[in-house]
């Protein structure tokens, strides 16, 4: 099999920036066309573009096909990125004749009959075989124990039929090698709602489904009022007559909007008469939902009335089967380290993410890893809110983003000050950048280093050592020389040596070349008090080195007067640095608290000339580690020099250490933070990830009407930068506008080539021609 390659591009063309190996690997495995025997048919990425452009241009009138082929190919080469099924399957029908160009669909309403239940299983199988995911609403099936007159028996209920759909999906291999994906929704007023909530607690059951409840405004009102909530299902005229049901008696019947009206009793407003099977306190049902989402992260939660209210096609459709998110600067804990999700979105890389065992519904603390889809943008501009805990943990997210709390899994909009949020409780993943020596050097500069223009007037970096720490100066000097030798382009030998100032008990190491080398790693005068990106993405040794050196410079072992308590403390007048360090520590399973110790103001300090002088001083803050996290810090990280480690060891002698920390942090403030682009990922196992050290939920699905389809594309903004990396850099609005115009026609042509297997799906997509276009690369642009 031929290795993935790309065509050579002119060096003057921005497209000459090469694809990353990971990009080529994903293209080769998922989107490159190959014959049955594995023979490569798309020799290059550009040949994939040619295949897609040719297929979509084939929709045009014969005399215009050549013109639009050229325009579509031009758009693909200049930043237009269709959805995955389009790239994989367009123009590949000779090799994959039964595949679709559509990623996701929603089933039609399932009527309460054996014929239609099995018909929808058949439709679902055909849809999955074509490569599409599919969602269903199962609350249109009568509850468990209801009598079926035609069969003369009692039904086993909708959950048992969901098992059939689950096994069908498990059995069918989705086109293009994708695992079959299904979603099930369920009305909160159905008599079997409690069984639906608990369904996935059974080991191995419904593993091909994501579950979500359809929550109505009426239910939320009942919860607020702690009212009785009727669980009911539609009534046929025959059932009303046979069972002596008085449809005008509110104790027996409630009138509700229902997606299916055939065969049921309707009032003048088109509502369906529903027999009340039982009632339960709305708050009790709410608590059941909350405890299930907390313990098992299922089911999801859809405010279906609001979804339909905000739907642009409200006049012709209702939605019954279905996104949360964080800002670009939020750090996701992955195999690449703790990386900003905006950067992950730019890379499009596949993800392994860290998840907390408690969010998986498992006993005990700790973390595990799970695969997740590449990061994606959920909105280019959304209202976001800042959540800050008493201990300093912080995140910005949309109102719909979910958090794990002591009250269960709760959306941000429903969080309250005082709620306790789950914090990462075990060691996570680390990246592949940097070394222990680099981490040590960066940490010492952040703690006891500074930048200066002394000497030859060049910007130099200085690392200071005072008192007992002076013994480490020669070692750091050797690290500096090794780093400079590896990065410097100078031919001559360059050596840095420690400089001693005996009168001040002080040794320092200074280098102008080191300052330039460190700028390569993102450390400058302006960024000294921020954790460098190389550390965020660093190896475990690199991160440990950074923390060990920083704590050596500015940290202490604080033992109480009676020696009953001991804590590790890091002092700084820069709370943003401490917040960064807090997230780094969380990835070791170390819980910490940030406290303000002294307000800003003037203080009398030594003036360096033997006297004292009044100086303006910033506020002081401390990061505090105690309890079992203190012990884990000393085991995993510790201090550079033994004299600080010995202070802890002496305190610990003879003491029984207990693991009692809850790894929770109480919310102190929730505030509106403005509008920003927001991003997310999807991790299938309980839909949970860790952002900024905090255990949260993540994205679900897009809401669609019956037989609706998801047809999407994105535009890569980085392709429109002219004269990049120069003072003349600018955005090519003219080309961008033309790409959007051409890409819109391309996506509309997909409607004609959809490849959907069901007539109802075909009718829905052809009638409404629904498609969406987003963008990527805004930060880099």
Image: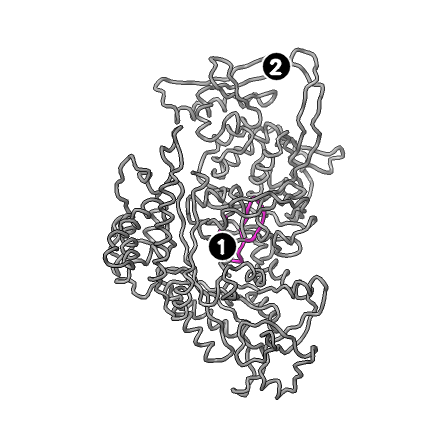
Name the image quarter holding the C terminus: top left
The residue lying toward the viewer, choosing from 565 and 331, is 331
From the viewer's perspective, is 358 left or right of 120?
Answer: right
Note whether 238 is above or below 545 in the view shown: below
Location of residue 315 in the rendering, given as x and y in whole percent from the top left corner: 51, 65
Note whether 205 is above or below 503 in the view shown: below
Residue under numbered circle 2: 504
The residue lying toward the viewer, choosing from 291 and 440, is 291
From the viewer's perspective, is 424 left or right of 163?
Answer: right
Label 2, label 1: how far apart the Cα atoms are: 56 Å
Residue under numbered circle 1: 683
Taking the magenta stretch, the answer to whether it contains residue 606 is no
Q: Quadrant of residue 361?
A: bottom right
Location of residue 70 in the rendering, given as x and y in whole percent from the top left corner: 27, 49
The residue lying toward the viewer, choosing from 500 and 421, is 421
SS of the residue at dot 2?
helix
Q: Quadrant of residue 56?
A: bottom left
Whether residue 40 is visible: no
Instruction: Specify the segment rendered in magenta.
Output: 679-697
Q: Say which of marks 2 and 1 sits in front.
A: 1
Whether residue 616 is visible: yes
Crowding around mark 2 (Cα neighbors within 10 Å: few <14, some 14 to 19, many 20+) is few
Location of residue 756 in the rendering, given as x and y in whole percent from the top left corner: 37, 66
Identify the residue shown where x is 65% and y is 52%. 415
Location of residue 622 in the rendering, given as x and y in whole percent from the top left corner: 66, 33
Taking the magenta stretch, the answer to whether it contains residue 680 is yes
Q: Quadrant of residue 118?
A: bottom left
Crowding around mark 1 (Cα neighbors within 10 Å: few <14, some 14 to 19, many 20+) is many
Note whether 88 is above or below 629 in the view shown: below
Q: Of callouts 2 and 1, which one flags the residue occurring earlier in the amino acid sequence?
A: 2
Tally of marks: 2
């Amino acid at each position: 099999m031929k290795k993935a390659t790309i065509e050579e591009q002119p060096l003057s063309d921005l497209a000459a920036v090469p694809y990353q190996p990971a990009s080529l690997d994903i293209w080769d495995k998922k989107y490159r066309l190959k014959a049955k025997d594995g023979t490569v048919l798309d020799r290059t990425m550009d040949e994939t573009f040619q295949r897609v452009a040719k297929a979509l241009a084939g929709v045009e009138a014969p005399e215009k096909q050549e013109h639009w082929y050229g325009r579509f190919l031009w758009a693909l080469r200049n930043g237009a990125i269709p959805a995955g099924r389009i790239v994989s399957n367009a123009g590949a029908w000779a090799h994959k004749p039964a595949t679709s160009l559509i990623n996701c669909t929603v089933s039609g309403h399932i009527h309460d009959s054996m014929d239609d239940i099995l018909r929808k299983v058949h439709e679902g199988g055909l849809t999955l075989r074509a490569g599409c995911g599919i969602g269903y609403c199962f609350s249109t099936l009568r509850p468990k124990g209801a009598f079926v007159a035609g069969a003369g028996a009692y039904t086993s209920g909708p959950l048992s039929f969901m098992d059939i759909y689950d096994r069908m999906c498990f059995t069918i291999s989705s086109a293009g090698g994708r695992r079959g994906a299904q979603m099930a929704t369920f009305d909160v007023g159905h008599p079997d709602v409690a069984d639906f909530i608990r369904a996935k607690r059974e080991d191995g059951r419904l593993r091909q489904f994501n579950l979500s409840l359809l929550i109505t405004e009426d239910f939320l009102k009942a919860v607020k009022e702690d009212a009785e909530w009727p669980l009911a299902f539609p009534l046929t005229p025959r059932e009303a007559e046979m069972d002596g049901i008085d449809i005008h008696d509110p104790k027996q019947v409630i009138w509700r909007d229902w997606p299916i009206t055939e065969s049921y009793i309707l009032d003048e407003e088109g509502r369906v008469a529903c027999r009340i099977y039982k009632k339960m306190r709305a708050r009790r049902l709410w608590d059941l939902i909350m405890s299930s989402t907390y313990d098992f992260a299922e089911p999801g939660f859809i405010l279906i009335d609001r979804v339909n209210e905000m739907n642009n096609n409200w006049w012709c459709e209702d939605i019954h089967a279905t996104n949360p998110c964080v800002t670009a600067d939020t750090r996701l804990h992955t195999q690449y380290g703790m990386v900003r999700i905006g950067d992950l979105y730019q890379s499009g890389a596949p993800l392994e993410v860290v998840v907390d065992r408690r969010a998986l519904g498992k006993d005990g603390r700790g973390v595990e890893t799970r695969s997740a889809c590449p990061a994606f943008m959920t909105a280019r501009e959304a209202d976001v809110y800042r959540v800050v805990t008493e201990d300093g943990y912080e995140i910005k997210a949309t109102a719909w983003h979910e958090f794990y709390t002591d009250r269960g899994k709760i959306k941000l909009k429903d969080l309250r000050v005082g709620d306790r949020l789950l914090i990462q409780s075990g060691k996570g993943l680390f990246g592949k950048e940097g070394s222990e020596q680099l981490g040590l050097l960066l940490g010492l500069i952040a703690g006891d280093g500074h930048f200066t223009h002394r000497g030859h007037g060049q910007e130099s970096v200085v690392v200071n050592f005072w008192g007992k720490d002076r013994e480490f100066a020669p070692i750091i000097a050797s690290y500096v020389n090794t780093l400079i030798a590896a990065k410097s382009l100078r031919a001559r030998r360059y050596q840095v040596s420690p400089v001693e100032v005996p009168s001040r008990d002080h040794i320092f190491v200074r280098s102008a070349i080191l300052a330039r080398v460190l700028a390569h790693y993102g450390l400058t005068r302006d960024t000294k008090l921020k954790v460098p990106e190389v550390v965020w993405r660093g190896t475990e040794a690199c991160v440990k080195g950074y923390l060990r050196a920083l704590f050596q410079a500015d940290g202490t072992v604080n033992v109480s007067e009676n020696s009953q308590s001991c804590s590790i403390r890091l002092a700084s007048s820069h709370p943003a640095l401490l917040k960064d360090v807090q997230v780094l520590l969380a990835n070791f399973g170390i819980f910490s608290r940030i406290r303000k110790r002294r307000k800003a103001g003037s203080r009398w300090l030594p003036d360096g000339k033997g006297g004292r002088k009044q100086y303006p001083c910033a506020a002081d803050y401390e990061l505090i580690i105690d309890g079992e996290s203190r012990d884990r810090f000393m085991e995993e990280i510790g201090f550079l020099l033994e004299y600080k480690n010995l202070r802890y060891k002496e305190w610990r002698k003879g003491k029984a250490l207990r693991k009692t920390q809850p790894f929770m942090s109480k919310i102190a403030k929730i505030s509106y933070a403005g509008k920003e682009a927001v991003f997310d990922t999807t991790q299938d196992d309980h839909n949970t990830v860790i952002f900024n050290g905090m255990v949260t939920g993540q994205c679900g699905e897009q809401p669609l009407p019956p037989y609706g389809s998801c047809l999407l594309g994105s535009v890569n903004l980085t392709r429109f930068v002219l004269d990049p990396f120069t003072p003349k850099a600018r955005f090519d609005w003219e080309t961008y506008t033309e790409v959007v115009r051409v890409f819109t026609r391309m996506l509309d042509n997909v409607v004609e080539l959809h490849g959907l297997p069901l007539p109802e799906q075909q009718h829905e997509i052809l009638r409404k021609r629904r498609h969406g276009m987003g963008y990527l690369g805004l930060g880099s642009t």
